[in-house]
Structure formats: C-alpha cells, structure tokens
Amino acid sequence: MEPTDDSRGGKAVQAAALLAFLAASAVVAYLGSQVTVGNVDGWYATADIAPWSPPGWVFGAVWTVLYTAMAVAAWLVWRSDDPGRRTALTVYCLQLALNLAWTPVFFGLYPALGSAALWLGLAIIVALALAVAAAVLCFGPISRTAGLLMLPYLSWVVFAVSLNVWAAAHN
C-alpha cells in the first residue's frame, strides 16, 4: 500500500523521518569506514583477495548509493499504513545491525585473530544476506519501490559474500 502525504504526518514530519533514515545509514557507513580505513592500508593491502574483486575506490562509491537507497526504502515503508510495516522495519534494523557488525569483525579482528576473523565475518555476512533478502520480501508487498530499492543492496551483499569466502579460504 503506497502512502499518501498525510499517512504519517505532514511534510515536515516526512522530511524529518527521511533525514533520520539517511542519518542512520550515514552513521553505519561512518563507523564502518573508521575500522576499514586503517586496515585496508594495513593487512588487507597484502591479503590474497579474489581475482574478481573491484578496485578499492568502487566500494566507497557503491556503498554511498546503496546506503542512500536503503534509507529511502525504509522511509517509504515507514510512511505506509500497512500492518506489516513494523515487522518490515524490524527486519531492516536487524540487517543494519548485521551490516555494522561485519566490518569490525572482518577488518578489525583479523590482526588479532587471523583467518578466524574472516570465517566469523563470513557467518555474519551470510546472516546479513539472509536478513536483506527478508527485508526485500517484507518491503515489496508494502511498497514495490522500496522492495526494488533493496535489490541492488542484496546483489552487492551476495557479491561481498563471494569476496569474503575467497578471503577466508586464502588468508
């Protein structure tokens, strides 16, 4: 059920909610980048990475687009009066938490735990992929646009699973 402008308050409330979803994504992105930056130039620079891994600059560009699309998708669901909205947003929060957990485990724990950190990261990113798939399935019936906005994210996370598998198996 697509919402009307009045279904969740006026335009100011709508704008504030969108900004809140964008801010949540920005916080997750920022926190992840704080762990990534030092380690990409550290242990990861000499790691055996998958031959299909894109250049490093691609990750930041892709994640910027994905985090924005995720936030807009969540906002579209939040605007809805659909009874499944609460469940869908709970699943969204779960996947956001898993997204936040993966980076410090994969990048941050490797210097201390070695390949065990990469295998633990794999468990987290597989759970993330499942949670994102669940979010797509929850979002789609509420807002087709929201469900579609989550599909590139799901595709990227599945791709990232393949990169994590390679890293875990070869480092």
Image: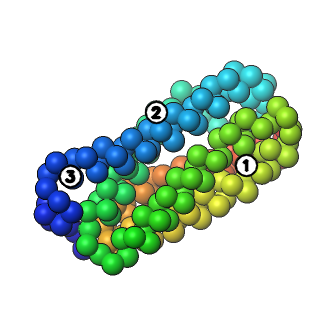
Q: Which mark is residue 61?
A: 2
Left or right for 85, reference 137: left
- Seen from this angle, which residue lies furthest bottom? 83
Amino acid type at circle 2 is: Ala
Position of the C terminus, as image quadrant, is top right
What kind of element bears circle 2? Answer: helix
Residue 107 screen position, x and y as percent: 71, 36
Position of the N terminus, as image quadrant, is bottom left
Left or right for 60, reference 54: left
The answer to whether the residue labelled 2 contacts the one labelled 1, judged by CB atoms less than 8 Å apart, is: no
Check disc 1 and report the residue beneath it.
121
Amino acid type at circle 3 is: Val
Check disc 3 and report the residue beneath it.
13
What kind of element bears circle 3? Answer: helix
Q: Quadrant of residue 166?
A: top right
At label 1, counting other C-alpha atoms closer than 10 Å, the crowd grade (few under 14, some 14-19, many 20 or more) is many
Q: Residue at x 38, y 63 (%)?
A: 147
Q: Quadrant of residue 33?
A: top right
